[in-house]
Image (spheres, grey):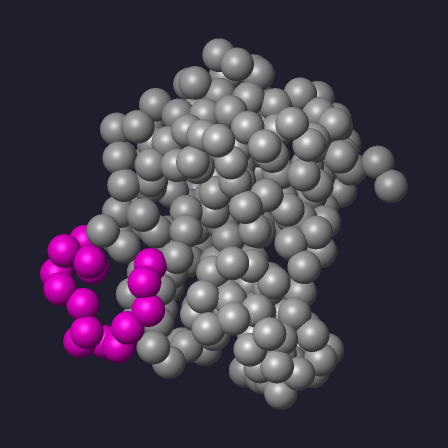
Amino acid sequence: MDLGIAGRTALVMGASRGIGRGIAEALGREGARVALSARAADALEQVAAGMDAETAVLPADTGDLEGMAALPARAADALGPVEILVTNTGGPPPGGALDHPREAWEEAYRSLVLAPQALMEAVLPGMRKRKWGRIVNVASSSVREPIPGLALSNAHRMATIGLFKTLADEVAADGVTVNSVATGLFATERLASLHGSMEDAERAALEQVPAGRLGTPEEYGDLVAFICSDRAGYLTGTVIPLDGGRLRSV
């Protein structure tokens, strides 16, 4: 299936590992030019070296909002104007509702809400002018069912969904789609750290996921590649669960 994104420029946040890497690689396989961004330059270079696509390595920190606002211009200088934006801006540390100091709440807000807002504000004028754009938010199943012990993620990811849903309505007539993926249990380093080990995460999936296993970053990337495609031009303002059937809520 031709997804119609060959030659388009994508900016993928958190592309050095896990889900972000899976997304970047999937977009590259479909012929997109991919700007890879995360804090770790060396890890990004390794990802770029393994991709059969035109890439640019753009280290950046989501806590630096001025840097976020400037990042799409850096991508455009390297590969062309950003037509696909993936806001995978990381996960804050675990803890209960009253376990974190105010500084941690502010840091999570910058990373999960303000960083995507800064990126979108930078790319949207060009997308609207060209009458084509795709913005995808890597969210969590916690936006449907809050996850115990992840208060920072639960609260701020819900705020991001509100931002994305509002924006989707404002730019739909300009050919720009804005969607989120409610991420379930995927085989990533972060999930392994939350569960203590990858083996423990796999055991949890056997008990909690109807599919009986963890998802893979490659599967995640394939879904995002479709959301970013010409074929998905009528899909916007959505939160799409990708969790092996784990969410029970309607």
Residue 56 position, x and y percent, is: 55, 22
Mark yes or no: residue 175 visible: no
Name the one closer to the observer, 120 or 246: 246
Residue 160 position, x and y percent, is: 37, 55
Q: Is residue 124 left or right of residue 134?
A: left
Q: Quadrant of residue 143?
A: bottom left
Q: Residue at x 48, y 43 (%)?
A: 14
Q: Quadrant of the C terminus?
A: bottom right
Magenta extent = 92-106
Q: Is residue 74 above or below residue 211?
A: above
Q: Residue at x 26, y 28 (%)?
A: 66
Q: Quadrant of residue 46?
A: top right
Q: Is residue 227 left or right of residue 139?
A: right
Q: Residue at x 71, y 56 (%)?
A: 219
Residue 97 sits inside the magenta stretch: yes
Q: Is residue 80 left or right of residue 94?
A: right
Q: Residue at x 41, y 29 (%)?
A: 59
Q: Is residue 205 left or right of residue 91?
A: right
Q: Quadrant of the N terminus?
A: top right
Residue 61 position, x and y percent, is: 33, 36
Residue 100 sits inside the magenta stretch: yes
Q: Is residue 224 above or below residue 142?
A: above
Name the one closer to the observer, 112 or 45: 45
